[in-house]
Image (spheres, rainbow, N blue to C red):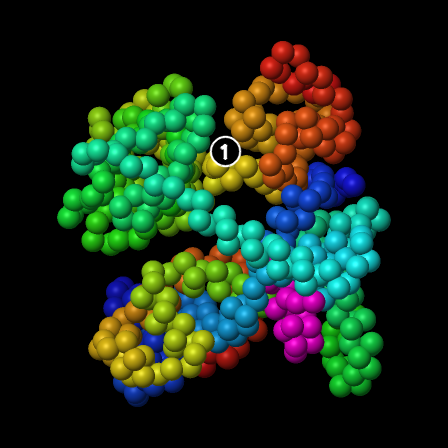
């Protein structure tokens, strides 16, 4: 149950599987959901991938890193699910994308999922008032005025809190997460 | 140098992102963007955060705790091949979780100041403001039963993990050894070592570390940082928050950590010594984790992982 991956040795035991669960589960569910467009189905799929990790046979096949292995397993499981549901005609693009031979480092949708996950965690760590206001605006879709009315505060306060959130978030997110997308988006500046 | 264009009004940025900017604000933004590449990059970052944040609702729909239980139940079902048992397993596990909450105790005491001292055991203290303090063995916490209006002050000897309730109006201050530690709301580990130095590792939030003797020396630490007060000086260590509170969580996690650091953490947690005599493995990085495991199991797994023999000699483990 141990493997050499360049200079890192990876031991698969109950405790490490639990660690990987906490690090990657939500992220992998969101990634799978981008193809399956069904969150509950995605969750079941990623759960099954983790259940398989406990098998000795599965553990022996980790040649790269746990993250890489989980990423590949989820991709394969997605392909199988789409094929099984016989909706592969509708999901032609997804199958093509998933069959592509890239690692998680080159996978744009995976990178996007990672950014979303880090952002989600960072938002949860904002001060309470700031966080609630930011979530109401971005996730619930309320306007600044609607938020102000709901919380019985001024619109100015709402705007200040959102600015504060953006400032904190942009300082907190690792530059490496955003670099892949720099090239795509730079073209949209006039 | 047009200093004006190095900074932009946060309000303007926000209005542009929300699509509610007027012509003057759009102009201001464009001028600021033209001023430097750094500004362009910053704006791109903001746009990404802005658009990505719309997609985040899906994360709140994922119940990590419940799904972990489902995984364990599926494992069990595979072993037993008893499908119907699944729903009973879930019900039993939830009941166990709820009953544990009621086992929490508070420490009664007389007078205004309370004192909690541990010897061979660990203890948990809930303070008047909701802050939780986890006290390691051979440690002592002195605290008022009711906090002052302007601050929350406690005194610590030994080692403890603090989970401080946020209160911007009342900073939480810990006097420990020579150190003065100040926080607004955060979780971190304070460790007074045998050599009179104090090590502060931050799990979440922001903490400041100062010396009583030289108040000019102040270090602000954020999530993941580890600071050390030694010989009246404060420095930030290269290491990150990882396993400093393993005495409390009973969990040790290593993700691509150099073997030397792994052995150090194990030495502290299990109160043993390692003597590595194997040159071949000393530069390896290790990924491994332990949760409530006895030292014998840890040794056995290290032997398998590193392909070495580990011999016990008194309280020392020699790696051949």
Q: Residues within 10 Å of mark 1 (few under 14, many from 20)?
A: many
Task: Name the residue at 51% across, 71% down.
Answer: B56
Can the viewer see residue A31 in this picture? yes
| Residue B144: image location, x then y, percent | 22, 38
Mark 1 secondary-structure assignment: helix
Residue A149 covered by magenta stretch: no
Q: Is residue A38 left or right of residue B222?
A: right
**Quadrant of the image containing the C terminus of chain B:** top right
The magenta-colored residue range is A24-44
Task: Name the residue at 82% across, 82% down.
Answer: A86
Depth check: give the residue in front, A122 or B88.
B88
Depth check: give the residue in front, B225 or B42.
B225
Q: Is residue B128 left or right of residue B150?
A: right
Task: Name the residue at 84% across, 49% down.
Answer: A57
| Residue B140: image location, x then y, percent | 33, 28
Q: Is residue B295 left or right of residue B179?
A: right
Q: Is residue B51 above or below residue B257?
A: below
| Residue B202: image location, x then y, percent | 41, 42
Depth check: give the residue in front, B65 or B215.
B65
Depth check: give the residue in front, A119 or B216.
A119
**Quadrant of the image containing the N terminus of chain B:** bottom left
Can the viewer see residue B9 in this picture? no
Residue at the limit of the structure toward the bottom, as seen here: B23
Which residue has dot 1 on it?
Answer: B247
Q: Is residue B247 above or below residue A175?
A: above
Task: Name the residue at 34% across, 75% down.
Answer: B13
Q: Is residue B236 above or below residue B39?
A: above
| Residue A91: image location, x then y, percent | 75, 82
Q: Is residue A39 left or right of residue A103?
A: left
């Amino acid at each position: 149950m141990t493997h050499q991956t360049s200079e890192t040795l990876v031991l698969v035991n109950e405790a490490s599987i639990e660690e990987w669960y906490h690090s990657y589960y939500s992220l992998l569910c969101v990634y799978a959901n981008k193809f399956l467009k069904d969150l509950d189905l995605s969750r079941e799929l990623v759960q099954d991938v983790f259940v398989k990790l406990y098998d000795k046979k599965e553990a022996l096949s980790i040649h790269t890193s746990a993250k890489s292995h989980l990423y590949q397993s989820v991709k394969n499981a997605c392909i199988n699910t789409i094929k099984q549901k016989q909706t592969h005609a509708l999901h032609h693009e997804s199958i093509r994308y998933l069959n592509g031979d890239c690692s998680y480092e080159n996978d744009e949708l995976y990178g996007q999922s990672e950014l979303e996950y880090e952002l989600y965690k960072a938002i949860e760590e904002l001060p309470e008032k700031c966080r609630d206001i930011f979530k109401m605006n971005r996730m619930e879709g309320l306007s600044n005025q609607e938020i102000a009315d709901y919380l019985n505060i001024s619109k100015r306060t709402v705007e200040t809190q959102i600015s504060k959130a953006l400032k904190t978030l942009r300082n907190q997110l690792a530059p490496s997460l955003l670099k892949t997308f720099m090239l795509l988006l730079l073209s949209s500046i006039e | 140098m047009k200093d004006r264009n190095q900074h932009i009004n946060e309000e303007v940025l926000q209005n542009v992102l929300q699509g509610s900017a007027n012509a003057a604000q759009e102009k201001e933004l464009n001028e600021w963007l033209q001023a430097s590449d750094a500004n362009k990059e910053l704006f791109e970052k903001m746009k990404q955060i802005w658009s990505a944040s719309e997609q985040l609702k899906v994360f709140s729909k994922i119940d990590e705790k419940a799904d972990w239980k489902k995984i364990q139940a599926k494992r069990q079902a595979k072993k037993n091949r008893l499908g119907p048992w699944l729903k009973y397993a879930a019900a039993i596990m939830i009941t166990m979780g709820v009953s544990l909450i009621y086992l929490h105790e508070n420490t009664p005491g007389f007078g205004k100041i309370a004192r909690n001292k541990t010897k061979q055991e660990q203890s948990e203290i809930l303070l008047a403001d909701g802050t939780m303090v986890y006290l390691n063995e051979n440690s002592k916490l002195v605290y008022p039963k009711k906090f002052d209006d302007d601050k929350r002050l406690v005194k610590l000897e030994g080692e403890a993990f603090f989970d401080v309730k946020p209160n911007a109006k009342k900073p939480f201050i810990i006097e420990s050894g020579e150190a003065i530690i100040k926080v607004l709301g955060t979780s971190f580990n304070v460790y007074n070592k045998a050599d009179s130095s104090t090590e502060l590792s931050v799990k979440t939030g922001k903490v400041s570390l100062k010396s009583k003797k030289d108040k000019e020396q102040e270090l602000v630490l954020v999530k993941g940082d580890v600071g050390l007060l030694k010989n009246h000086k404060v420095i930030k260590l290269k290491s990150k928050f990882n396993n400093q509170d393993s005495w409390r969580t009973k969990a040790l996690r290593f993700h691509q950590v150099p073997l030397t650091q792994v052995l150090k953490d194990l030495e502290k947690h299990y109160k043993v010594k390692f003597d590595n005599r194997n040159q071949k493995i000393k530069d390896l990085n290790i990924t491994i984790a332990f949760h409530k495991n006895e030292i014998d199991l840890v040794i056995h797994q290290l032997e398998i992982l590193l392909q070495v023999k580990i011999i016990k000699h008194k309280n020392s483990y020699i790696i051949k």
